[in-house]
Image: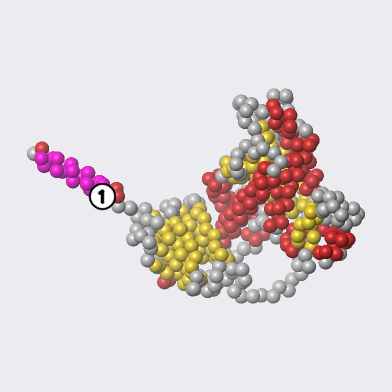
């Protein structure tokens, strides 16, 4: 009897090992949806759980491959109809593992692509989103409307804390709310002196503004970016250094999902409100635009954060070796690229003393401004003067330069350089950076 019991235990353990080692098909493709047309197409895979996946392109012929790990599909690909003409056909193919599922999108031409996942938002569950875009539209149309008026890039500058909220207080009594307001005003002044840019101060005095209202003020100003200026602190005096923060992925997902549940807020979103208001196709298209706008906003925040970090790293000590990602409430407006900038540690006596000096504040402000300029030169928002200057170069004035000589070398008029740089005279200084229109 004992022998049979021992055999039964061994068989049970063996069976448990076999089942544990065999990967379960944990996920299921329940539906595939399409949006857009011709040059821009979105493919949405509705899934039963969060996917593990890989997306890559192949050429000759052009196609996009989507591999979903431990997944089976309930979709009959032969019955799918894609909008536009970019996706010719969707088909299944042999995956690298028998437990995986592979979809292939046969394309009519080469296309760039992006992909991301979305958490459940009723009535949808988990989703894998693949966006495809072509450089040249398949169907060319000739524009007959007049070009839209060019506008300034709007930068919302948020001085942290204020009013009844002093923020951190340094050993010498420096209050964060006062320091951040001083630096914010300096930054706003520099931005307003830059052609094609305009600053909006979230608070311009010692007043209290709650975190939600800060984002709302930036939204009402139709800001292209929000910079929240702060000073850090710790329970011991040793930590020091500045930092740049962007919204974490988890907080970004939560805030985007909140937007998706608040349809009445759609038309207020910066960068997508008008498009959503005029969109045809109902709720699904509106949700697509909200999601797409949020993804672009987060990408812009990360790009701007990296440029600003790089410039700050040249003039001050940084607390961390790169841009950090945190769940910070002031950054939660996912339709506006948002950054939190820590100028240094007030709890560090040496850094507190340095942060109070005009010279160090000017270094920080100049670095932040340079990072902003670099970002917007390379990523100009639509219908802005920066976009109009898409064909511009930056020129740093050297010893012996004159405005007329610079204009002659670049084949432009002196008046054009003066206008684009808001110069009231032809006087220039060594080290000054000028924007020069290309010919």
201 or 309, which lies in front?
309
Predominant SS of the magenta segment: helix
Q: Residue at x 77, y 40 (%)?
A: 362
Q: Residue at x 37, y 59 (%)?
A: 100
Q: Pointer 1: residues within 10 angstroms few (<14), some, or many (20+)?
A: few
Q: Quadrant of the C terminus?
A: bottom right
Residue 391 picture quarter:
bottom right
For mark 1, give the secondary structure.
Answer: helix
From the image, tell me which residue sits under label 1.
Answer: 18
Q: Is residue 188 visible?
A: yes
Find out whether residue 11 is within the magenta segment: yes
Q: Position of residue 402 (x, y in %)?
A: 88, 57
Q: Residue at x 77, y 52 (%)?
A: 197
* Vertical order, 184 against 270 (above or below): above
Q: Residue at x 62, y 42 (%)?
A: 245
Q: Position of residue 29 (x, y in %)?
A: 41, 59
313 or 153, which lies in front?
313
The span picked out in magenta is: 3-19
């Amino acid at each position: 009897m004992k022998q049979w019991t021992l055999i039964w235990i061994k068989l049970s353990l063996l069976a448990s090992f076999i089942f544990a080692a065999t990967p379960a098909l944990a996920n299921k493709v329940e539906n595939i949806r399409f949006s857009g047309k011709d040059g821009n197409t979105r493919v949405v895979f509705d899934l039963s759980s969060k996917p593990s996946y890989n997306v890559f392109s192949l050429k000759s012929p052009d196609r996009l491959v989507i591999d979903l790990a431990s997944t089976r599909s309930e979709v009959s690909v032969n019955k799918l109809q894609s909008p536009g003409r970019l996706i010719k056909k969707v088909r299944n193919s042999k995956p690298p593992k028998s437990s995986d599922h592979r979809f292939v999108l046969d394309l009519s031409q080469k296309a760039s692509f992006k992909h991301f996942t979305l958490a459940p938002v009723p009535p949808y569950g988990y989703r894998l989103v693949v966006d495809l875009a072509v450089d040249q539209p398949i169907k060319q149309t000739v524009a007959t409307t007049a070009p839209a008026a060019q506008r300034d890039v709007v930068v919302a500058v948020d001085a942290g804390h204020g009013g009844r909220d002093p923020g951190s207080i340094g050993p010498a009594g420096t209050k964060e709310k006062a320091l951040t307001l001083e630096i914010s005003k300096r930054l706003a002044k520099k931005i307003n002196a830059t052609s094609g840019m305009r600053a909006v101060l979230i608070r311009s005095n010692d007043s209290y503004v709650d975190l939600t209202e800060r984002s709302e003020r930036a939204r009402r100003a139709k800001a292209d970016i929000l910079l929240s200026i702060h000073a850090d602190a710790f329970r011991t005096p040793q930590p020091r250094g500045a930092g740049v923060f962007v919204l974490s992925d988890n907080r970004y997902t939560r805030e985007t999902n909140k937007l998706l549940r608040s349809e009445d807020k759609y038309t207020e979103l910066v960068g997508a409100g008008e498009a959503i208001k005029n969109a045809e196709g109902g709720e699904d298209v509106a949700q697509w635009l909200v999601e797409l706008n949020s993804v672009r906003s987060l990408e812009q925040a990360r790009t701007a954060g990296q440029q600003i970090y790089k410039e700050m790293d040249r003039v001050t000590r940084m607390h961390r070796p790169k841009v950090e990602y945190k769940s910070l409430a002031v950054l939660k407006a996912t339709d506006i690229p948002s950054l939190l900038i820590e100028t240094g540690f007030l709890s560090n006596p040496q850094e507190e003393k340095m942060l109070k000096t005009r010279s160090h504040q000017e270094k920080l402000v100049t670095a932040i401004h340079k990072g902003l300029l670099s970002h917007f030169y390379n990523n100009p928002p639509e219908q802005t003067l920066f976009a109009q200057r898409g064909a511009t170069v930056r020129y740093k004035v050297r010893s012996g330069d004159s405005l007329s000589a610079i204009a002659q070398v670049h084949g432009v008029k002196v008046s054009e350089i003066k206008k684009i740089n808001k110069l009231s005279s032809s006087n220039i200084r060594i080290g000054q950076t000028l924007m020069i229109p290309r010919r």
